[in-house]
Amino acid sequence: MYYYLKGIVVEIGDNFIVVDVNSIGYQVLVMHPEEYHIDDEVLVYISHIIREDEEYFIGFSSLDDKKFFNKLINCKGIGPKTALSALRGISVSEFINCVMTEDVKRLKKLDGIGPKAASQIILDLKGTLVDIETKVSKSNINKNQNDAKEALISLGFKEKDILECFTKINDNTLSVEEYITQTLRMIRK
C-alpha cells in the first residue's frame, strides 16, 4: 500500500500533477493543482484507488486531508472521483464545519453532491470526525471567535448555529463584539 510520494513536480494538469520519484513519474489526481509548481520538491500523501477497470492515485498535501477523504468515500453513494470533485469546491475544514452544523444547503451546491447525498454524508460522518474535527476547530477558530462563541452560548444560542455563522464570516480580524454582532444578525434572519 502506498502512503506518500516524495519527489519533484514535473508536470501540472487541470486536475493532476506528475511527481518524479527516482526517475519514475507518478500521475496524481489532486484537489488544487494550482497549489503546486514545476520543479518544487513535494511530499504528497496518497490514496491508491483500484477498481475493476481503472487504477489511480489521489494526492493530498496533509495527512488530515487524506484521512477526511477516506472517511468521505466510505459514505453511502460517494465514490473517490465524486469526493475529489466536491472537495475542489470547498476546503476540508469548511466541509467538516458543514457536517458539524448540518449545512445541507452548502453541501448540495458542491459538484456531484445532491440533496440526498448531502444528507447521507451528514448522517454517515456526524460524530465520526472527532480526531480531524478537533484539529480543524482549533485551527479555524481564533481567540476572538472562541470568546464570542462562549458568550453566545451563555446567552442560549446553539454552538451548531454559531459555528455555521462563523463559516460565513470571511474576516478573521474582527473583535469579539463584532463577531457577536455579525452572528446575531445572521441568526435573526
Image (spheres, helix red, strand yellow):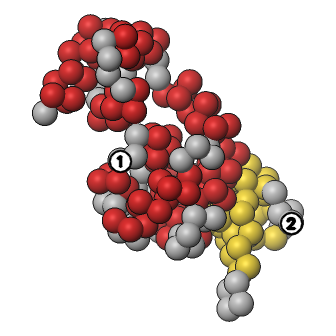
Can residue 42 be seen here? The reply is: no
On the rendered structure, is 42 left or right of 183? right
Nearer to us in this view, 86 or 124: 124
Residue 103 position, x and y percent, is 35, 47
Q: Secondary structure at mark 2?
A: loop
Task: Identify the residue under disc 1.
Answer: 103
Report which quarter residue 129 is drawn in: top right
Badge 2 amino acid: Met
Residue 183 position, x and y percent, is 25, 23
Residue 86 position, x and y percent, is 45, 62
Residue at position x 58%, y 43% from top? 127
Residue at position x 36%, y 21% from top? 172
Residue 73 position, x and y percent, is 60, 65
Residue at the bottom extreme?
A: 53
Q: Quadrant of the C terminus?
A: top left
Earlier in the chain: of badge 2 and badge 1, it is 2
Q: Secondary structure at mark 1?
A: loop
Can residue 82 be seen here? The reply is: yes
Q: Nearer the viewer, mark 2 or mark 1?
A: 1
Query: Which mark identifies residue 48?
Result: none
Given contact means CB atoms under 8 Å apart, are the residues at marks 2 and 1 in contact? no
Disc 2 versus disc 1: distance between alpha carbons?
Answer: 35 Å
Task: Identify the residue under disc 2.
Answer: 1
Vertical comparison of 50 with 4: above or below: below
Vertical comparison of 184 with 17: above or below: above
Residue at the left extreme?
A: 189
Residue at position x 58%, y 36% from top? 133
